[in-house]
Image (cartoon, rainbow, N blue to C red):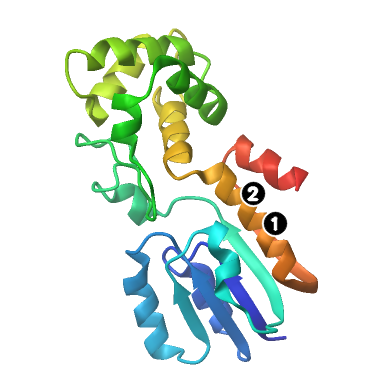
Amino acid sequence: HGGTFIDCTFGQGGYTKKILEFKDTKVIALDRDIKSKKLADKILEKFQGRFYFKNKKFSQLSDLKLKKEDISAIIFDLGYSYTQIKDSSKGLSFNFKGDLNMQMGLNDFSAKETINKLGVKELEKIFKFFGEEKEAKRIAINIIKERQKKEINTKNLVDLIEKNKRTKNYRTHSATKVFQALRIFVNKEISELINGLILASKILKKDGVLAVVTFHSLEDKIVKYF
């Protein structure tokens, strides 16, 4: 039926391109990652007047100043794109050897600062609540010990986690939960998601659709509760 759609996680533009295939549609896309703008510029060439891109976070949804726009649907796809995970400058993956980073854009601090500066109690809380990591305390204590010798980078952190995991799950990498926790913390993903959902519900038209794709139990619980 056409209408205006907001793609809150533009990424590689998958959802946006699909929606724009239908005539009478308009897409306002958001992404905190400035690297997404290159792809957005290509789409803009083809769909001028029907496509707009903003380098913003979910919590800035209300900055869009939508003048009586009828918003038919708002989409959040909370996963990281393949290109973001493969981007070594972002350091999202435990397969990289370089500095810890994990900043997706419009951030206040990095994973490197988090790991090398925060106290043992803060690190334990981050791993426990955002990663649901059972060995949170043990890993946090050993990070403090290790960083007295040298600054911790991605490889050091992965080695340290593997050494301190008492129970191994052979289906998932030992560092998965700690890396998830760091990504969530550095990008303030939980508060961003909650703010995004609240703001989205306020700007949707009556009977509009709010679609959310989640990737782990924390996000899943928040979205279902909302």
Q: What x and y, as percent, mark residue 181? A: 47, 32
> Is residue 199 visible to the viewer in this orientation of the structure?
yes
Residue at 20% in and 34% down = 97
Mark carried by residue 147 = none
Q: What x and y, as percent, mark residue 92? A: 34, 42
Residue at 58% in and 84% down = 26
Q: As drawn, is 140 to the left or to the right of 69?
A: left
Disc 1: CA contacts within 10 A as few (<14), some (14-19) or many (>=20): some
Quick one: quadrant of the N terminus?
bottom right
Q: Secondary structure at mark 2?
A: helix
Quadrant of residue 83 within the rendered picture: bottom left
Which three-letter amino acid code belongs to the residue tagged 2?
Ile
- In the image, 183 versus 161, the foreground residue is 183
Badge 2 vs badge 1, beta-carbon distance below 8 Å: yes
Quadrant of residue 215 within the rendered picture: top right
Q: What x and y, as percent, mark residue 60? A: 54, 62
Q: Secondary structure at mark 1?
A: helix
Residue at 51% in and 22% down = 125
Q: CA distance from mark 2 to mark 1?
A: 6 Å
Q: What x and y, as percent, mark residue 204? A: 73, 71
Which residue, given by chain and number where applicable, does mark 1 sit on?
198
Mark carried by residue 194 = 2
> Is residue 165 visible to the viewer in this orientation of the structure?
no
Residue at 63% in and 91% down = 24
Q: Residue furthest right?
A: 207
Which three-letter amino acid code belongs to the residue tagged 1?
Ile
Q: Residue furthest left?
A: 150
Disc 2: CA contacts within 10 A as few (<14), some (14-19) or many (>=20): some
